[in-house]
Image: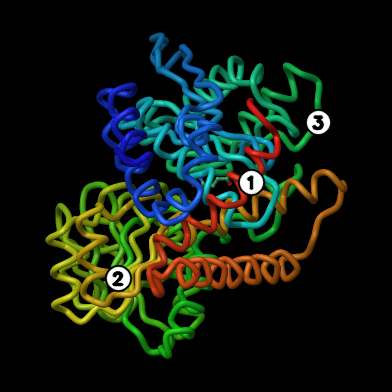
Amino acid sequence: MRYVDEIIELVEKKNPAEPEFHQAVKEVLNSLRPVIEANEEVYRREALLERLVEPDRQIKFRVPWVDDKGQVQVNTGYRVQFNNSIGPYKGGLRLHPSVNLGIIKFLGFEQIFKNSLTGLPIGGGKGGSDFDPKGKSDREVMAFCKSFMTELYKYIGADVDVPAGDIGTGAREIGYMFGQYKKITGLYEGVLTGKGLSYGGSLARKEATGYGLLYLTEEMLKCNGKDLAGKTVCISGSGNVAIYAAEKASQLGAKVVTVSDSTGWVYDPEGIDLGLLKEVKEVKRARLTEYARARSSAEYHEGRGVWTVKCDIALPCATQNELHLEDAKALVSNGCIAVAEGANMPTTLEATEYLQKNGVLFAPGKAANAGGVATSALEMSQNSERLSWTFEEVDTKLKNIMVNIFHNLDAAAKKYGHEGDYVVGANIAGFEKVAEAMLAQGVC
Ligand code: GLU
């Protein structure tokens, strides 16, 4: 049996009932075959893959808090510190009712390669809780965040593990957690990123994942003789990634016609009104029905359906496994030329394969959405030197990072005979640096 197949089997056996983790491992390891087969003897002797798929540690804890009625609530908190061979663990905290250990492990595993691709010294980790911030008062969110940090603080630190935002965790939640970390430890340090600007946050961090997605997409199109300007774009999601992806897409001359949330989606043939979208989502924290109510050109539909709209470019920016095989078929038959993932693993394995077989340019999330964590690393640099850079400085660095990521994965795909397969390219480019660092550091 080949080494890769043995490891896939091992992961399924050792981590039962974690389908998302299995999916992420399969996607990565299958595309690493050319590199692994070329180095099989060394990797086997060093148990490199066994070490790569086993997190350094996984922390699971109780998070008790009191709701507005005086009732005690209990959630489960997680932090999976996956791999710190190239830098301190780095990755977001997801607050969503769907969160479980398998989801955090898939996200942490992806983060290892994503963070490596940024070219910055950050390892891979992820955390979160099954707490649902939706519909909670500010006081309830604060109570949860403070309780969450009361346990998490033991395991993190500016040079150890630096959590950040993800679904359900934005500047508000990071603020409450930062306050609690400082209160318990007495340390004022860059232990979290995505902080507010008044206490160590970085300009352009909020925009970074969405902007970075478009910088990479633009470069991918350019290198394939195509252009972003004038194109119609479908976006799913309406959170931080989707909003700033839509903003940069319109700045670059494309028209964004859809957004979605967990209950429905909006089709706005005139182009999404960003001012209104930000007001509904960032200020009122309301549903997209509010957007549709306030805008006469917009249609609101219940359920899912963004990928049935005719577009040139599709940017899934909601969550994992939201673009299925039938969606991929609809996109191809509507003439879509490119899919770039703003979310983590939004496209299923079958859908990815179908898109690639049908000539659609496909940029995987670990490359395409790396702008967020890359800018988090820039926030860490600013915190270390106790300085803040201008928006333009950060944005220019972000753009360079995204353009470099694209060229690195393009080159890695070519080097191993898979020209144009950016999934293979991203996984190989991300893996090579981590593997080299792990081998250099010996058995640990
Ligand atoms: N949650 C984001 C991601 O999936 C950002 C993580 C960070 O900034 O550390 O990459």
Q: Which residue is mark 3?
A: 188
Residue 394 place in picture, x, y as percent? 71, 64
127 sits left or right of 435 in the view: left
439 sits left or right of 100 in the view: right
Given residues 429 and 104, the one toward you in this image is 429
Numbered disc 3: secondary structure: loop
User: In this rendering, which labeled residue sits more in front, label 1 or label 3?
Assistant: 1
Residue 283 place in picture, x, y as percent? 48, 51
Residue 88 place in picture, x, y as percent? 68, 36
Distance of label 2 from label 1 (alpha carbons):
39 Å
User: In this rendering, which labeled residue sits more in front, label 2 or label 1?
Assistant: 1
Numbered disc 2: secondary structure: strand
Residue 65 in view, yes or no:
no
* Quadrant in the rendering for residue 189: top right
Residue 436: which numbered mark, if any?
A: 1
Q: Residue at x 53, y 32 (%)?
A: 45
Residue 7 place in picture, x, y as percent? 36, 34
Above or below: residue 306 compared with residue 194: below
Given residues 91 and 390, the one toward you in this image is 91
